[in-house]
Image: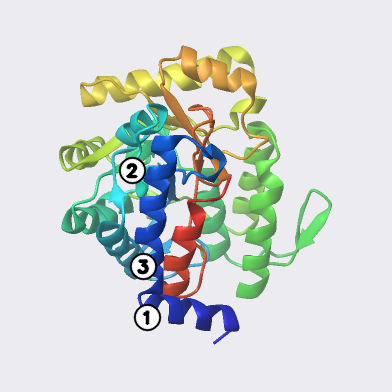
Amino acid sequence: MSSKATIASLVYRTKLLSMWRQGAAKLDQLNKRAGLMPQLERGTLVFVFHRLCEAQNPFQPGTPVELFDWICGHLAENYQVLPLAELEERRLSRTPPSTAVAITFDDGYADNYELALPILRRHRLPATVFVTTGCMEGKNLLWTSRLGWTLEHGTQPEQPVEIRGRRFALASRKERLQALSHLKVELKELDQIEREEILDRLRVAMHVEGFSGLKREMLSWDQLREMEACGFGAGGHTVNHPILSREPLAQLRLELAGCREELESRLKRKVDLFAYPNGGPADYNLEVMQETRRAGYRLACTMLFGANHPAVNPYELRRVSVYAETFPGIALQMERFFYLT
């Protein structure tokens, strides 16, 4: 065990972390009421997940169910987990609890219903799922899923496949995982036409005839409606999951408005929460933020890492995800996240 893991375990098991959390929350409330040092206020945390898994598959990676269950239990016991909309309302009104967090999921994978929902219900926690409406019920499949499926299930090509100046032999599992890691980054930077041409060429070279095994990968509308009835609210994540900063204005507006209109039609309620696809600093810009607001959304989540302090723009909300290797390490991480600006 590393020295960091040892220290985290000691702090966690001796209740020092619990004592720190309680003391820090009380001091934070005093500081917020007095308004003396706003730079030292604890922010609100928005946790982000994508897919869950019962067995790890590096070709289609996800958060292990056991880890998600522990995270939910820890949050339920030690923090105030709020619906994202309420969390943001309280942040903007300067009245957030010092231990306020929200849970979100991106894309709309079916395992959010099959695996996450039972855990959330057991711990009585709300969550938000940001849905890519064009992918619902497997009508379209995310390109990352198709890439992973091709590399996992395809046969070795007769000769190495050349993609943007690099040759991939794709004979061993190790070579395929290395290709997956490289191509996820490389192809993300391309426009949709070029990316689809490369994916199709790779599929043909590896003799993959289709993606029938992914047909139930995404949520159905019935599943989403049931999730909503159990406190798992839906938000928008575009129609086709493009990088919005690269879209022409007309298409940007279609992606934003089309997603919201479909969700509201299917769910019979107002939908005004949004998350930018990919969500990195280069994936949205001022125009995208303005158009998101114009489309009727009242907040938008990014993948920028950190807590949300009073000055954070509601159309540029930060989110966090855990990455420590042990439960005590994760518990320590969570508390530290409140101070990340």
Q: Quadrant of the C terminus?
A: top right
Q: Mark 2 to mark 1: distance in Å?
A: 25 Å
Quick check: 325 left or right of 93? right
Mark before the other along the chain sequence, 2 or 1: 1
The residue tagged with tag 2: helix, strand or loop? loop
Q: Amino acid at mark 3?
A: Met
Between residues 194 and 10, which one lies in front from this camera angle? 10
Above-or-below relation of 134 to 16: above
Q: Which mark is residue 19?
A: 3
Q: Which mark is residue 14?
A: 1
Q: Is mark 2 in CB contact (under 8 Å) with mark 1? A: no
Question: Crowding at label 2, few (<14), some or many (≥20) Cα neighbours within 10 Å?
Answer: many
Mark before the other along the chain sequence, 3 or 1: 1
Residue 33 placement (x, y as % from top left): 39, 36
Q: Is residue 105 visible?
A: no
Residue 240 placement (x, y as % from top left): 49, 31
Above-or-below relation of 250 to 206: above
Between residues 303 and 85, which one lies in front from this camera angle? 85
Residue 50 placement (x, y as % from top left): 43, 50
Mark before the other along the chain sequence, 3 or 2: 3
For discs 3 and 2, the disc positioned in front in the rendered view: 3
Q: Which mark is residue 97?
A: 2
